[in-house]
Amino acid sequence: DQQVKQNSPSLSVQEGRISILNCDYTNSMFDYFLWYKKYPAEGPTFLISISSIKDKNEDGRFTVFLNKSAKHLSLHIVPSQPGDSAVYFCAASARDGNNRKLIWGLGTSLAVNP
Amino acid sequence: EAEVAQSPRYKITEKSQAVAFWCDPISGHATLYWYRQILGQGPELLVQFQDESVVDDSQLPKDRFSAERLKGVDSTLKIQPAELGDSAMYLCASSLGRDTPLHFGNGTRLTVT
């Protein structure tokens, strides 16, 4: 059972417009969320994170929104650039004793068209 | 920016052979992870180390996979014997602590023939 769901396998956006990538989760114990970007043949690159005590975190062109009541988070990229074309993974974690375990979504492939 | 180093980048091996992957985390990162990623899926945690100790290996197929981090710095993941289903990208990641982001290496692409 997928605890972290990225329901859109792919997304296509025009350069300069906003890209919105969505992520839903089922475990109410998740309190730390991250977004990663992955290019082919490379490891995932950390983009931005958000703690459950916040509802928004912004870093340059990237903003993550968290709606705890809906168990939903989204990544906004404004403006989108062709170099943003990659697979984006949402990940969530909860405390497990002294440890944390990341649960990953299946990813959304973003294509930004010039 | 410091990086997680992994080698080799690519490995082709025949089934039933042994294979090993190496990872050097970012200096000062106490937590080290080995993940496996199959195309079209998210990374799957195999093993997590805190310094030299294993804190989670619940998803590691221990009949054929082993991992060590003897001095709490670099780490080796071994598969013996390799099976066709082991073909995947093997990713190493490290983090400063449990509430900080993971930083990944570029992985080892394993093909078992």
Image (cartoon, coloured by chain):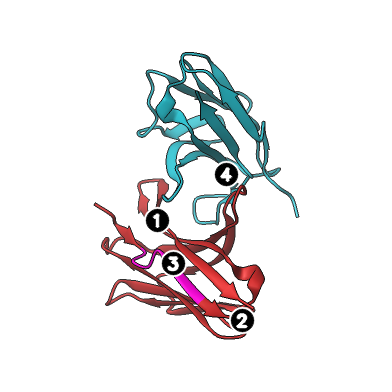
Chain colours: A red, B cyan
The residue most toward the right is: B1
The residue most toward the bottom is: A17
- Left or right of A97 in this view: A64: right
Judge the density around disc 3: few (<14), some (14-19), many (≥20) Cα neighbours within 10 Å.
some
Q: Chain of mark 3?
A: A
Discs 2 and 1 carry the same chain letter: yes
- The residue identified by callout 2 is A15
Residue toward you, B6 or A85: A85
Element marked by disc 3? strand
On the image, the x and y values in percent for residue B33 come to 52, 40
Q: CA distance from mark 2 to mark 1?
A: 24 Å
Q: Amino acid at mark 2?
A: Glu
Q: CA distance from mark 4 to mark 1?
A: 18 Å
Q: Can you tell which quarter of the image residue B63 is in?
A: top left
- Left or right of A95 in this view: B107: right
Discs 2 and 3 carry the same chain letter: yes
Q: Which residue is rendered at x = 40% and y = 32% of the image?
A: B57
- The residue identified by callout 4 is B93
Q: CA distance from mark 4 to mark 3?
A: 26 Å
Label 4 close to label 1 by CB (< 8 Å)? no
On the image, the x and y values in percent for residue B52 come to 56, 29
Q: Which residue is rendered at x = 27% and y = 60% of the image?
A: A27
Q: Chain of mark 4?
A: B
Q: Amino acid at mark 3?
A: Ser
On the image, the x and y values in percent for residue A13 come to 52, 78
Q: Can you tell which quarter of the image residue B31 is in?
A: top right
- The residue identified by callout 3 is A10
Residue toward you, A68 or B61: B61
Q: CA distance from mark 4 to mark 2?
A: 32 Å
Residue toward you, A10 or A29: A10
Q: CA distance from mark 2 to mark 3?
A: 16 Å
* First to last magenta residue range: A6-12
